[in-house]
Image (cartoon, rainbow, N blue to C red):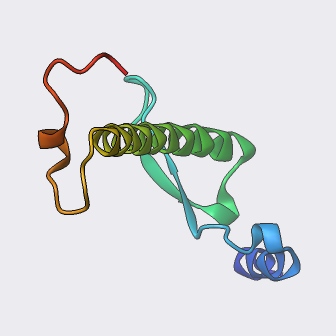
């Protein structure tokens, strides 16, 4: 069975593996190697571990952005903003730290 066939079988057999990507992005390692992309069917466990670290970093940045936007939204609503208002214009300059 080829590597592609094994990957297809894994995706078909398991709901949790159905979204396996075709490749993994292995981030650069502090001056020791450049970022590279490797087909998932040839990725080692270490490759997957490094790819997961990179994805977790991106997810954390996305969650921080979501939290910041949610904070601005909530602050504007607490200050009486309605849908068409510019959010940052509705927050008083002397607003306490949130």
Q: Which residue shows up at 45% across the image and 29% down it?
A: 29
Please determine whether, in this image, residue 16 is positioned above or below residue 50. Answer: below
Residue 21: image location, x then y, percent:
60, 67
- In screen coordinates, is 1 left or right of 28? right
46 or 64, nearer to the observer: 64
Percent of width and height locating residue 20: 67, 67
User: Image height check: is 30 above or below 38?
Assistant: above
- Which quarter of the image is occupied by the N terminus? bottom right
Which quarter of the rendering shows the C terminus? top left
Horizontal and vertical percent for residue 55? 53, 45
Q: How many marks?
A: 0
| Closer to the camera in the image, 68 or 9 | 68
Please give left or right for residue 93 compared with residue 34 in the image: left
Residue pictured at 58% horizontal, 37% vertical: 53
Side of 92 relative to 50 (left or right): left
Q: Residue most toward the front?
A: 80
To which quarter of the image does residue 15 belong?
bottom right
Residue at 27% of width from left, 45% of height from top?
Answer: 80
Q: Indicate whether 10 appears above or below 33.
A: below
* Residue at the limit of the structure toward the right, as seen here: 13
């Amino acid at each position: 069975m080829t590597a592609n066939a094994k990957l297809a079988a894994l995706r078909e057999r398991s709901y949790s593996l159905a979204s396996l990507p075709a490749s993994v992005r292995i981030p650069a390692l502090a001056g020791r190697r450049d970022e590279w992309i490797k087909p998932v069917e040839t990725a080692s466990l270490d490759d997957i571990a490094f790819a997961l670290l990179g994805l977790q970093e991106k997810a954390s940045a996305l969650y921080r952005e979501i939290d910041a936007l949610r904070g601005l939204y909530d602050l504007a609503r607490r200050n009486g903003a309605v849908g068409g208002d510019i959010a940052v214009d509705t927050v008083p300059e002397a607003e306490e730290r949130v």
